[in-house]
Image (spheres, helix red, strand yellow):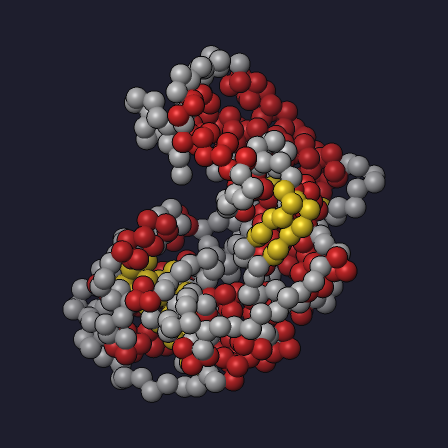
Amino acid sequence: NYTCLLPGETDTPVDRAPCTRETGFDCSIKHRCPYFSDRTIASNRQVAAMTLAYFMQTAGSGAFGQRDVAVIDEAHGLAEWAEMYATIDLRPDTVPMWDELSVPDIDGVEAAARFADRLSGGCGRRNDTLVGADELTVAEVTERDRLQELISNLDWFVSDYRDPGSASTWITDQAGGESSSVTIKPLNPERYLQHTVWDRANRFALLSATILDKEEFCRGVGLDPDDAALVDVSHTFPVENRPLYDVTQGKMTYEHRDETLPKIARLVVRLMTHHVDEKGIVHAHSYAIADRLVDRLREFGVGGRVRMHDREDRDAALETWLATDDPELFVAVKMEEALDLEGDLARWQVLCKAPYPNTRDSRVARRLEEGQWGWYYRTALKTVIQACGRVVRAPDDHGATYLADASLLDLFDRSRGAMPEWFTAQVDRMSRPELPAFDPDAAGGDGDGAASPSRQSRESRSGPENHPLADVWGVE
């Protein structure tokens, strides 16, 4: 969010500026640097606002001392943040020296520890070379920072794994065997939150609409339930302004998807006709589903009204869609949370698939082996509730949510006991709407099959099958 002030560096992010690239660099205008100025002001103020990611990254830096009270919004995601920070992904885009490595077949945690130890040594030697240089390029600064973070994570894993007193249980994933990507993660990542979050303030206010089970939430983030109080606040948005509609076309599980997805594409065309003058969003759940859905919509001739994004340009595509006044349909992946579509930014949305956790993730598989099916359903329900809130952002706002996957109805039945009362009321009012007939011309079709922006190949998006978000990249 901040760029350098120096001549010739005004497009350079501050973490890649000359002060980070050149040994002993003395910046004559550091006192005017917006980043350091704002950080100093925030650290000295009684109240400071920042992203959770930045808050966690500054742990131990001294930039922000311990506060009396910390307020964390969207706190239901703390466990996921802990998992993200505690997981070590070793693959070409995270290991600068990947092409020089000989990656063995990792058949267990001991093998992973030996490989991590060896990799840390190699990264350390390369890092020493970069640190010893008088001046670095922007690319070398990026490599140095990545190496230092990787070394820290690898050493932490090896030390914790070999500590007989450690309470951690580590697991590894390597779907492709020798020479393929490796993921290393603890079964209890909530420990990571202790020094990054809980040690940073005396008291906390954790805000979320989807803390569905207090005890489970506390366990998942490393808190004692007896030290926490749950304050339940009623929903302030009228239930009639946030309707749910049952437009299910069948199940979107992998074995049923070929049959169901074409039906959903036809449904979307009918919804585009019903909302011909209104912007909408489709939550496609994975890039594989998004690709196939947009392909069908292009075949129907409504591609000119459809916008989608790639993994690389998701923010830019979203901003472009938000800025337009045209009634475009945005096909999105993993945008069920933290998206504010107030007013005419979007009046309708479609949930294509029940967002269950990826069972190829070894941590998810372990939980299910232990019979934690309640957690499995509550996790999916939490995502659905978050998604339903994207298009209704104020008491006088209104927006419709359409459920296209029959598995969503099954999810509601299985998790009804975990639903907040205000969402139960929403589900109880659910009905099947009367929609126009399938007519691409009436939906704004002009025979143009192009969807904006142009798509990348499916192959360029796919990631390792064992990744916690493997279903997003389309390998589910």
Decide if residue 195 is in sight here.
yes
Total count of labels: 0
Left/right placement of residue 378 relative to residue 442 reads right
Q: Which residue is painted at 55% across and 21% down in the image?
A: 126
Q: In this image, 273 relative to 37: left or right?
A: left
Name the one closer to the observer, 457 or 224. 224
Which x, y percent locates residue 297? Answer: 28, 68
Q: Residue furthest front?
A: 46
Q: Residue furthest right?
A: 165
Residue 223 drawn at (x, y percent): 72, 54
Q: Nearer the viewer, residue 304 or 340?
A: 340
Q: Position of residue 61 (x, y in %)?
A: 60, 31
Q: Is residue 170 left or right of residue 75?
A: right
Q: Quadrant of the N terminus?
A: top left
Q: Using the image, determine if residue 2 lies above or below residue 186.
A: above
Residue at 68% x, 56% y: name it: 220
Q: Nearer the viewer, residue 356 or 36?
A: 36
Residue at image coords 74%, 48%: 169
Quadrant of residue 111 in the image? top right
Q: Nearer the viewer, residue 7 or 186?
A: 7
Q: Is residue 453 above or below residue 384?
A: above
Q: Position of residue 228 (x, y in %)?
A: 71, 59
Give the vertical position of 118 relative to 471 (above or below).
Answer: above
> Residue 395 is drawn in which quadrant?
bottom left
Q: Is residue 288 visible?
A: no
